[in-house]
Image (spheres, helix red, strand yellow):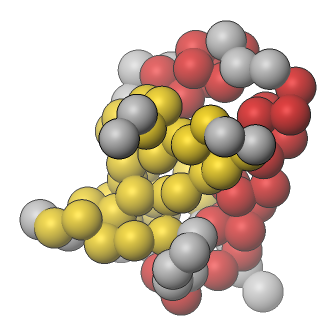
Amino acid sequence: MLKWKLYQYESMVDSFFNSCGSDMKEAIEERLDLLSEKGNMCKMPVSKPIGNKLFALRVKENRQQVRLIYFFRPGKEIVFVHIFYKTT
């Protein structure tokens, strides 16, 4: 099965990832691997459409939640445009 290719805007996912603790890093990696395998077939609770062809990859570790905002491009490509800790 051909995996989806993951891209990021201005290395923001790498920067955020490097600031996380080891447990959160592991949780993010697991979700990214799952998204890379399933792509647009990922549904809740892994991924949620948020409008305007954008989706949120949902990561939860202990009491912290992270959201990675992305969109799909032709050729099985996924582009991440924002990442943040969910606070509310």
State left or right for residue 71 relative to residue 22.
left
Instruction: Say if 65 sits above or below 12 in the image.
Output: below
User: Which quadrant: the C terminus?
Assistant: top left
Identify the residue shown where x is 40% and y is 34%.
87
Location of residue 40 in the rendering, given as x and y in whole percent from the top left corner: 48, 81
Pick out the residue farthest to the left.
Answer: 52
Identify the residue shown where x is 24% and y is 65%.
50
Is residue 80 visible to us here? Answer: no
State left or right for residue 42 relative to residue 67.
right
Which of the 4 image quadrants contains residue 4? Answer: bottom right
User: Which quadrant: the N terminus?
Assistant: bottom right
Location of residue 81 in the rendering, given as x and y in whole percent from the top left corner: 34, 39
Location of residue 62 in the rendering, given as x and y in whole percent from the top left corner: 75, 43
Tally of numbered discs: 0
Closer-to-camera residue (77/56)? 56
Location of residue 71 in the rendering, given as x and y in whole percent from the top left corner: 33, 59
Identify the residue shown where x is 56% and y is 43%.
65
Which of the 4 image quadrants contains residue 33? Answer: bottom right
Closer-to-camera residue (4/65)? 65
State left or right for residue 37 relative to residue 67.
right
Which of the 4 image quadrants contains residue 5? Answer: bottom right
Instruction: Say if 43 sits above or below 73 in the image.
Output: below
Instruction: Say if 42 sits above or below 61 in the image.
Output: below
Is residue 40 visible to us here? Answer: yes
